[in-house]
Image: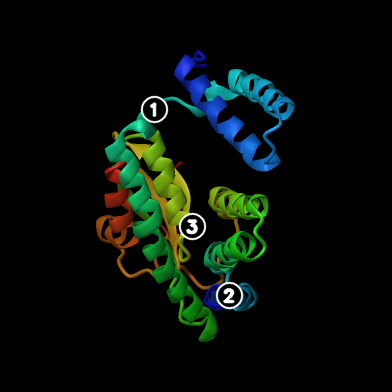
């Protein structure tokens, strides 16, 4: 088990407190104090499960702008394209599908980057990440794909996550 | 008035995608393809509707707290939906549920036999 570190506690505290303020939406001093105490307790107990890497990447302006770019431009475009594709398949009778599970290599090293990419793949209709494995220092995802257009790992990976991975690589290594 | 039209269009687009996802859930051939169709409801279906809801709450109802809460709902759906989809798909596969028609490629099944 990892030891609890101060930056991890601080970041978890900030996130919990911001969430409390958003949910209650009242700036009474009593509410704020109660929220601060509760989020500090939560942060002390749970920080070591959540944060294992440098937690202050968010305050690096270059990374922050790449995150904004990813969340506002790159990911929504992919999301809309995939949504229109799956909606077309649904409206035209659901028979023109060609499902399969492919194993694709992933070039990201950091934990945050890998989980962000896996969640982005699952959020895109048409692809679901089923499992993550590691063989010889190389991470692989098993992805269920509704329309298998390429059977080899690299070509399939390029089609499924090419743009997404390029966007995430600017934020996490 | 113009903003009202934008809100209506957003909510209508969300409803169309939700309809597509529902048809997919009912008519797709196997479990995994049904889950793919259900992501369609969870992403653009709810996202477009909640963006419309945020605009409605902020501009027409003038209620900041309602707008922020709708935004939090959308954020929570985005954060939790992939986790659930991943866990259901993996659990179904490990439990031995296979599509009737043979899949084109099945790397996961191939690698599981080796274990």
Q: Which mark is residue A56?
A: 1
Chain under callout 2: B
Above-or-below relation of A115 to A142: above
Tell me if residue A20 comes above or below residue B78 in the rendering.
above
Q: Picture quarter containing residue A55? A: top left
Q: Position of residue A67 (x, y in %)?
A: 36, 45
Label 1 SS: helix
Same chain letter for marks 1 and 2: no
Q: Residues within 10 Å of mark 1 (few under 14, many from 20)?
A: few
In-front residue for pair B70/A137: B70
Q: Position of residue A126 (x, y in %)?
A: 46, 66
Q: Quadrant of residue B62?
A: bottom right
Give residue A147's mark. Answer: none
The colour style of the image is rainbow
- State whether residue B41 appears in this view: no
Q: Position of residue B10 (x, y in %)?
A: 54, 73
Front-lying residue, A112 or B50: B50
The answer to whether marks 1 and 2 mark residues whose Cβ atoms lie closer than 8 Å is: no
Left/right of residue B76 with respect to residue A104 in the rendered view: right
Residue indicated by mark 3? A123
Q: List x then y, in percent, for residue B38.
A: 58, 66
Q: Name above or below for residue A149 compared with residue A110.
A: below
* Pointer 2 residue: B4
Nearer to me, A152 or B63: B63
Of marks 2 and 3, the one in the foreground: 2
Q: Residues within 10 Å of mark 3 (few under 14, many from 20)?
A: many
Q: Quadrant of the N terminus of chain B?
A: bottom right
């Amino acid at each position: 088990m990892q030891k609890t570190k101060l930056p991890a506690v601080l970041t978890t505290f900030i996130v919990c407190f911001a969430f409390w303020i958003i949910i209650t939406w009242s700036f009474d001093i009593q509410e704020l104090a109660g929220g601060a105490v509760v989020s500090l307790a939560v942060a002390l107990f749970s920080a070591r499960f959540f944060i294992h890497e440098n937690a202050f990447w968010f305050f690096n302006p270059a990374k922050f702008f790449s995150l904004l770019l990813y969340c506002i431009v790159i990911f929504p475009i992919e999301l809309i394209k995939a949504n229109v594709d799956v909606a077309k398949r649904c409206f035209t009778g659901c028979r023109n599908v060609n499902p399969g599970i492919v194993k694709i290599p992933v070039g990201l090293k950091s934990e945050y980057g890998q989980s962000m990419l896996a969640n982005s793949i699952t959020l895109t209709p048409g692809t679901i990440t089923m499992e993550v494995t590691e063989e010889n220092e190389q991470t692989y995802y098993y992805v269920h794909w509704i329309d298998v257009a390429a059977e080899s790992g690299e070509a399939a990976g390029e089609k499924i996550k090419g743009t997404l991975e390029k966007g995430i690589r600017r934020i996490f290594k | 008035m113009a903003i009202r039209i934008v809100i209506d269009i957003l909510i209508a687009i969300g409803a169309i995608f939700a309809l597509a996802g529902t048809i997919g859930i009912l008519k797709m051939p196997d479990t995994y393809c049904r889950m793919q169709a259900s992501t369609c409801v969870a992403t653009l279906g709810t996202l477009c509707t909640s963006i419309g809801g945020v605009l409605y709450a902020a501009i027409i109802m003038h209620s900041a707290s309602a707008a922020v809460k709708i935004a939090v709902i959308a954020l929570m759906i985005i954060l939790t939906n992939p986790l659930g989809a991943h866990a259901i798909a993996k659990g179904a596969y490990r439990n031995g549920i296979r599509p009737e028609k043979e899949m084109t490629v099945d790397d996961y099944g191939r690698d599981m036999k080796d274990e």
